[in-house]
Image (cartoon, helix red, strand yellow):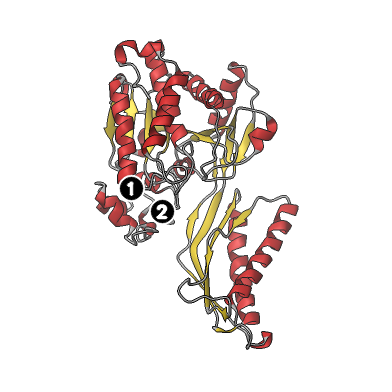
Amino acid sequence: MNALPRPADVSAVSDLEIASYLFDEIASRTRDVEGVSRPAFSQIETDTLRFLEDFALSHGLCVWYDAGQNARFCLPEDRDAKRYVIVGSHVDSVPAGGNFDGLAGVVAGLLCLLRAKREGVKFSRPVHVLAMRGEESAWFGPCYIGSKALTGTLAPELAAKHKADGRTLDEHMADVGIPMEKVRESVPLMDLSEIEAYLELHIEQGPLLIGKKLPAAVVSGIRGNFRHRRIRCLGEAGHSGAVPRAYRRDPVLAMSDLLVRLDESWMTILNMGDDLVLTAGMVSTDPATHAMSRIPDEISFSLDIRSQSAKTLDDMRRLLDAEMRQVEKERKVRFELDREMRVEPALCAPEIVAGLKAAMERLGMEPFVMPSGGGHDAAVFAAAGVPSGMVFVRNRNGSHNPQEAMDLPDFLAGTDILHEFLKG
C-alpha cells in the first residue's frame, strides 16, 4: 500500500484512509499461517509499536515510551501535561488471532489526536494515547500484564511461563527493558494520580450489537474472573478392556463428571438471575503415552470462570473445591490445581458512562449501554482507582480468531463517540 501523505498535506487524508492503512499494514507485518500473531513481549510486538511510532512522528505527533515499554502518543503541546486522559488498548494478539482485538483501540486514539490536529480542536483535557504490551493471557497465562505492571499489581504472576519456550514472564519483560525490580516490588510504573480517566475502544466479542443492529455501544462494566491454566486430575493407568468399571480410577471420566456438575450449577445460577460464564478451553492427556486401548493415568485442563459479581466468583470457588472433593471420593482420583489467577469485576465510572451516552446523542446515535463479557485493561485501571469507560464496536464472528469482521464505518462511529466525549 502507498505511504500516507506527510504532515504538510495530512488534511487531505480521511480517517477512513488512515484507519485502513494502519490496519492493513500491521496485518501484513504480523501475518501468521492463519490470521495474525503478535506475541506478548516479542520482537513482533516491539516492531508493531515501532511502526506506530514512525507513523505518529511522521504526522506531527509526540511519541515516547514509558517504563513498561508501552508506546505513548499525544499532541506536542500536551507532552508535559500534569493531568491527562488516557485513551488506550493493547497491540498483542492471541496466536493466529484477529487483527482488530486491541489494535482498534490504539488506532482510534491516534485518529482522535490526528483529527484534533487537523481541525484545530482543543480537547477539554490533555489526551495521551497508550499502546500497551501484553494484554492477552494466551502466551503466559496471566492477562492484562502490561496494565498490571503500570498499576503495580503484577508481581504475584511473574513466575508464569511462556507457552512455547518455558521462560518466565519476568525474563521476557526484562528482555524488552522493563525495570523488573519495581515490578517485583509492586511499585506502579506510572503515577496514577496524573490520570483523570482511562478510555478504551474495543470490538465487541459477542453478538449483541449485531442483533441490535447498532454500530457501537457504551460499556457499563467488565466481568472479573478466576482462572487455572492447568488443573491435573490423577488416576491410574490400565488396559481398556481388562479393568472393570468398579476398579477404575479414570481421570478423564472424573474430569467430565466435575465439568458436568459445574455446568449444572451454572444453569442454576443463571436461573436465579445472576451472571456467570465457565470455560475449559484446554484439555489434554499425555500425547507420549495415551492410546486408544489405555486408560490414562492423568488428564490436565484449564478453567476460566467469569462473573460481574465478586460474590458469585467467591461462591464458585467454594463450589469448585467442594465438587472436586466429592468427585475424588467417588472416583478415587486426585485433583491438583496450579496457582489461581484472579481479576476483580469492574464497573465503569457512572459519570463517564453518562458522558459517553451524551456524546452518542449529540452525534445522532441511539445511546445503548451494555456489559462486557470479556476482560479488558480498563478493568485493571478501574480497580486501581482510575475512573474508566469503554466503547464497544460492532464486530461479526466474535474475537480471538482470524474471522473477526469489524466494518470500518462502525469503527469510525465508535471513534466519533470517543472524539466527541474528549471535546467535552
Between marks 2 and 1, how big is the CA–CA gap?
Answer: 9 Å
Say if residue 86 shows up in the picture: no
Look at the numbered disc 1 and give the secondary structure of its residue: loop
- Residue 388 percent across, percent down from the top left: 49, 36
**Is residue 287 rendered to the left or right of residue 118?**
right
Marks 2/1 in contact by CB < 8 Å: the verdict is: yes
Q: In this view, does 38 lie above or below 6?
A: below
Nearest the camera: 20 or 162? 20
Mark 1 surroundings within 10 Å by alpha-carbon count, few (fewer than 14), some (14 through 19), many (20 or more) = many
In this rendering, the count of numbered labels is 2
**Is residue 318 rendered to the left or right of residue 19?**
right
**Is residue 399 rendered to the left or right of residue 75?**
right
Q: Mark 2 points at which residue?
A: 139
Residue 237 sits in quarter? bottom right
| Residue 214 marker | none
Q: Which residue is drawn at 62% across and 17% down?
A: 364
